Amino acid sequence: MFFRRHKLRTNFRPANCEFVSIPSGVILNDETVYQLCKQAVSQARAGADVVSPSDMMDGRVGAIRSALDAEGFNDVSIMSYTAKYASSFYGPFREALDSNPRFGDKKTYQMNPANYREALLETAADEAEGADILLVKPGLPYLDIIRLLRDNSALPIAAYQVSGEYSMIKAGGALNMIDEEKVMMESLMCLRRAGADVILTYFARQAAAVLCGMGSAAK
């Protein structure tokens, strides 16, 4: 199964996931959703089994579902970024891609880390619009949100272990402060215990080797 995450890269604000009105700084929700629909259809044509818009625009799941269905891609699923928080844990990823916001921040459309109730509203909205999988991002700092969604939805729940989580474990292991492999596996187990059916992680290949008995403990 091929998952494809998509976000906007525009000539207006290439570091953001959305179109922005200049000079007001207002997020252009509907214009962004229109472009996301075009991207989703393009990715489906290229062979994606699942599309995953990371924008957090209102109404995008329903619009993408309609766009995919209109082009005959009824079997292409949508993994919605249901609870994507305005988190500092994205830092290493943004630094590597030089994609830190060029102005302002993303708090106007990503979720407030202090607000757990909004996740319930987003869950209900995404389900109603036709989402197939509900994603929580970041993962480990938001185990309570994963459990909240698990207890309030019958849909599969996904957790995204982001670059900051990965980097902290790698750095701790490199400094011999922790056992990298054991902490890695414990962190993934915690995501699963909280209710995640799907885990997206930079540790995917390393964790798979451990699960197949090819990790350092097996050597």
Image (cartoon, grey):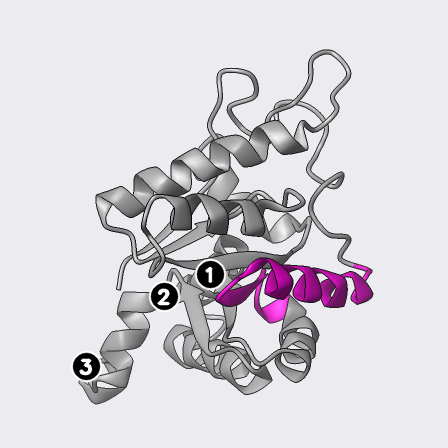
Point out the tag, 1 or 3, that comes first from the N-terminus.
1
Q: Report the span colored magenta.
A: 114-141
Is residue 166 in view? yes
Residue 100 lies, with reference to residue 189, above or below; the image says above
Quarter occupied by residue 207 = bottom left
Q: Is the residue under label 1 in contact with that under label 2 (CB below 8 Å)?
A: yes
* Amino acid type at image mark 3: Met
Quarter occupied by residue 218 = bottom left
Q: Give the CA separation, mark 3 to mark 2.
A: 14 Å
Q: Which residue sits at x=48%, y=54%?
A: 163
Residue 97 is left or right of residue 89, and the answer is: left
Residue 203's mark? 2
Where residue 13 sits: x, y (%)? Answer: 56, 21
Q: Which residue is mark 3?
A: 214
Q: Could you tell me which quadrant the C terminus lies in?
A: bottom left
Residue 33 lies, with reference to residue 117, above or below; the image says above
* Amino acid type at image mark 1: Tyr
Q: Which residue is mark 1?
A: 166
* Amino acid type at image mark 2: Phe
Tell me the SS state at disc 1.
helix
Q: Which residue sits at x=27%, y=75%?
A: 208
Where residue 187 sits: x, y (%)? Answer: 50, 77
Q: Is the residue under label 2 in contact with that under label 3 (CB below 8 Å)?
A: no
Point out the tag, 2 or 1, that comes first from the N-terminus.
1
Q: Which residue sits at x=50%, y=63%?
A: 160
Tell me the SS state at disc 2.
loop
Q: Give the CA separation, mark 1 to mark 3.
A: 20 Å
Q: Which residue sits at x=59%, y=70%?
A: 140
